[in-house]
Image: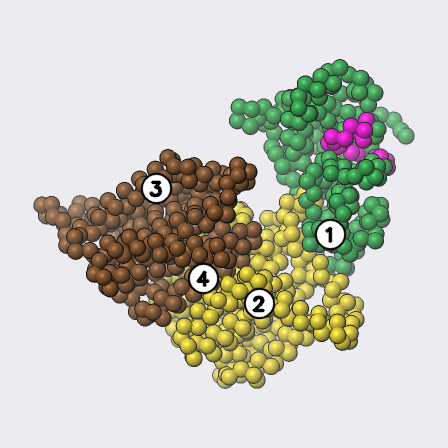
Chain colours: A yellow, B green, C brown
Amino acid sequence: MLRRLLPAPAMLASIAAVVVLPLILPSVAMATEVVVFIIATLGCNLLLGYVGLLSFGQAISFGVGAYACGLALIHLHIGVWGGLFAALICSIIAGLVVGALSIQKRGIYFVMLTFAFSQMFYFIAYAMAEVTGGDNGLLNVPRPPLTVFGVTLLSLGTPLSMYCLAAIVFLVLFVFLHRLVASPFGSTLIAIRENEERAIAVGYNTRIFKIIAFVISSWVTGMAGALYALFLNFAPLSNIDVSMSERIIIMTIVGGTNSLFGSVLGATFYVVVGNLLASVWPRWLLVLGIILIVVAGYLRGGLWSGVEWTWQRLRARWPVAGAVEQREDRGGA
Amino acid sequence: MSAEPRTALAVEGLTKRFGGFAALKHVSFAVREHSIHSLIGPNGAGKTTLFNCLTGALKPSAGRVVFAGRDITHLPPHRRARIGMGRSFQVTNLFQNLTVFESLRLAAQAQTGLAALDFVRPKELLRRAVANAEVVLDRLGLGPYRNTKAGELSHGRQRLLEVGLALAVGPSLLLLDEPTAGMGVEDIGAMKELIATLARDYTIVLIEHNMRVVLDISDMITVMHLGEVLVEGRSDAVRRDDRVKAAYLGSEG
Amino acid sequence: MNLYLIQVLNGLGIGMIYFLIAVGLSVIFGIMNFVNFAHGAFYLLGAYLCYAIAAATDSFWLALAVGPLAIGALAWAAETRFLCRLYRVEHMYQILVTLGLALVIQELVVLIWGPIGTHVSAPALFRGVLSYGDFAYPKYRLFVIGFSAVLALTLWLLLERTRYGAILRAGTESTEMVSLLGIDIFRLFSLTFALGAYLAGLAGVLAAPIRGAEPFMGPEALTIAFVVVVIGGMGSFAGALAGGLLVGVVQSVMSSLWSEGANVMIYVAMALVILLRPRGLFGRT
C-alpha cells in the first residue's frame, strides 16, 4: 500500500533523470534525443528483458511511428495529438501483423523472422518513395503547438518545449510499463521467459501473451518514432533500417535488461557518448565496439548491474532507507 | 464413500505411430476417480509416449482420451491445465530463477482466466492466486523456502515443487511423471506419503520406476510392454504375474 | 535474350560469392550454435586486403592466396582468445559481441584506408570481355564462376572424403557425440570458425574487382548470408550452395525487371521459408 504513495527508487530516479538531463547535457536538443531513445529502448527492453524475445523489429515500429506521425501532420493537418494517435494506431497494427507471424517460431528462427520483416519494411518504405520520400526521407514535418480545447499547453516552438513533450510521454510510458511488469500480466511474461514449456503446462496460452507483449513493445517504440519525427521535423529512411534495430538492441543490453531503468542508462549512455565522442573523433564506433565486447563478455547485466552493485556496496556500509529497498526486493520475482 | 465410482480418465484404443514404428498400439484403460493408477513397464514400453498423449504434447495417430466425460484428444496442452489436469515433469522443469512462492502463485494465476491479463494492478492483489499458492505451499511443507529460488533448492525439494506446480493449477487429475526420480531414500518416503494423501482429494496417474512405491500405494497398475497393455490389476496380482516378470527380465528394463 | 543470359550469368557469379560467405556462417551456426554477426566483417577485410596487396605487389593472385589466410588466422586468434567463451551463452550476447567485433574491424578499415571506397582492378589475365558473336561477357566474372565452382567441389571433397569433413558433418548433428568419441571439440570449433572466416575473406577478395572495396559492405554481405542460410538450411553445405545460387540468380534477374520489388521479394521468401519450412531446402530439423 505504501508503494502507491511513495514511488519506488527507480521511479524517483527516472523523474530525477528527466529533470536533470537538460541541465547537465550540452544542449536541450541532445536531451530530447536521449529521451526519444530511452522510450525506444524501453519498448525493446519489455520484449528482451521481460519476455526473453530478441527482436530485430524495433526499426519497424520506430519507422512506422515516425512516418505515421509525420504523414498525419503533413496531409491531415491534425494537431500533435492526431500525429501521436496515428503513430499509435499504425505501430500497433504493424506490431500485431509482425508479432502474430513471428511468434509462430521460437529461438533463432524467431530472431531471423523479425530480421526478415525488418528488411521487408525497409525496402517497402524505400520503394514507396511518393509516400515516404524514399531515400530523402519525409521532409518538412510540421510541429504545431500542443493544444487542448483551444488552449495551448506547449508551444513546441522552443527546444525546451519540445523536450517537455518528450519527457512527459516518457514518464507516462515509464509508469505504465513499471506497473505492467509488476502486474499479473507482467509476471506471466517473466514466467514465459524463465520456462515457456512450464508456463504452457500450468495453463498459459503463451502465444497470446507474447503477441500482446509484442504489440505493446511496438506501440512504445512507435511513440518514440513519432516524437523523433516531431523533434527533427523530418522522418529519414534510416529510422526503418535494420541498423536502427541494432542500435536500439545495443542500448538495451548495454543499459541492462534486468530493470526498466536500465533502458534509461543505456540510451543516455549511447546517445551522449556517441554525440560527444563523434564530434571529437569520427571513429567513435570503434570505442563502442570495444564496449560491446566488454559488456557482453564481462558485464552481462549491463550498466544497471554496475549501478546495482554499487548500490549494494553503499547499502552495506550505510544501512539507511532500508525499508524502501525491502519493498523493492519483495516486489521482484 | 458412495455409489458407483466414476471414471476420471479413460484412454480408448490409443495408437501412436512415428513413421513406420508404432510406439503405442491400441492402448485402453480407465482410471477411477480418487484412485492412484500407476503406469509401469520396462524402457521402451511406451509409457512416455502415452504420457505425452495424455498431457497434449503429442497427438495420437488413432484413439481417444476422455477426461471427465469430455473428449480431449486434440485439446492443446495449456487448455488441459485449465480444465483440471495438472502435470509434473520427469526431468525437473521449474522456473529456476523465480522463488518457490512466485512459482506456485504463477501456476495458480493461470487459472484466473482474464485476470491474468491485468496489466495495471500489482500481482500481489490477485488474491485468489496468492491464496491458492499459500495452500499448496503449506501442503508441501515448503513454507520455510517460500523465498528461495527454485534453482537453489535441494533436489528432493525441487521434485516436491514439481508436484506443487501441478497442484497449484487446482486440478482434479494429477499426472505425475516419475516424481521420485533421482531422490534419496528419505525423500522418496516423504513423496510416497504425499502422493498417498493426495489421493483423497485428487485422481492420480503415475509413471514410476520405483517398484516399492508403485506396489505400496497404487490402487491399480497398468503394465505396458512394447507399446501395448500387458497386464492390468492390483498390486499383488501384478507382482505375481509371470508375464510381467518376463517382460522386465527379458528386456534391458 | 542476351540481356537475360547476362543477368543469369551475373546471378551465378554473385550467387557463388554468396555461397562462399554463407557456407561458413551456416556451418558455424550448425556446429557451434553460434550466431556470428562479424562474418560480414571478414568479407570486408577480404575485399580490402585484396585492394591493399594488389596495390602493393601488383599481384591479384598473391592477394587471393594470402589475404584469406590472414583473415583465417585473425579469426582463429579471436576465437581462441575470447569468442570460445560465448558458446554456452545466450544468443543475444553472442550477437552483441560479434557486432562489437564487426564494428571494430569496420572502423579500423576506415582508419587505415579512409571512408570512401576504392575500385579494384581485375587481374591482368582476366581483364576485358570474352566475345562470342555479338555476345560479350567480362572475363573476370567467368573466372569467378569457374574458380568458385572448383572451390565448391574442393570443399565438398573435404566434407565427404576427409576425416575432418566427417567429423564436421557429425558435429552438425551432435557435438556431444563427437566429443564423446574423444575428439577435441574446441580444436574443431576453432578450425571451423577459421575456415568459415577464410571462405568469407575469399569471397571478399573475389568480389572486390566486381564490387570494389567500400567500408560499409560488411552488413550487406551479412544480411544476404542470413537469407541464404535460412533458405538453404542451417548447417548444410548443399543448402548454402543451392541457396546462394538461387538468391543470386533471382536477385539478378529480378533487378532488371523490378528492382525495388526484388529486394522485398527476397525477404518475403526468407520469412515464408522460416514460417512454412524452417529447415530450408537441405537443412535438418
Of A68 and C52, the residue lying toward us: C52
Q: Position of residue C33 (x, y in %)?
A: 50, 48
Label 3 secondary element: helix
Q: Nearer the viewer, mark 2 or mark 1?
A: 1
Residue that mark 3 sits on:
C155
Query: Is B180 left or right of C265, judged from the image as shown?
Result: right
Q: Where is residue B123 in the image (x, y as percent from the top left)?
A: 73, 59
| Above or below A195: residue A27 | below
In which quadrant is the N terminus of chain A drawn?
Answer: bottom right
Find residue C101 and name its label: 4
- The Cα–Cα distance between marks 3 and 1, rounded to whole angstroms, is 48 Å
Of C279 and B121, the residue lying toward us: C279
Badge 1: chain ID: B
Q: Do labels 3 and 1 share a chain?
A: no
| Above or below C1: residue A304 | below
Residue that mark 2 sits on:
A255
- The Cα–Cα distance between marks 2 and 1, rounded to whole angstroms, is 27 Å
Badge 4: chain ID: C
Query: Is B196 left or right of A35, judged from the image as shown?
Result: right
Q: What amino acid does circle 3 point to?
A: Leu
The residues colored magenta run B195-215
Q: Where is residue A16 in the image (x, y as percent from the top left)?
A: 64, 78
In which quadrant is the C terminus of chain A drawn?
Answer: bottom right
Measuring 14% from the left and 52% from the top, which residue is drawn there?
C129
Q: Residues within 10 Å of mark 4 (few under 14, many from 20)?
A: many
Of A217 and C158, the residue lying toward us: C158
Q: What amino acid does circle 1 point to?
A: Glu
> Can you see residue A212?
no
For marks 4 and 3 on the same chain, the one whose residue lies earlier in the sequence: 4
Q: Do the residues labelled 4 and 1 touch (CB within 8 Å)?
A: no
Q: Residues within 10 Å of mark 1 (few under 14, many from 20)?
A: some
Measuring 70% from the left and 60% from the top, which residue is drawn there?
A183
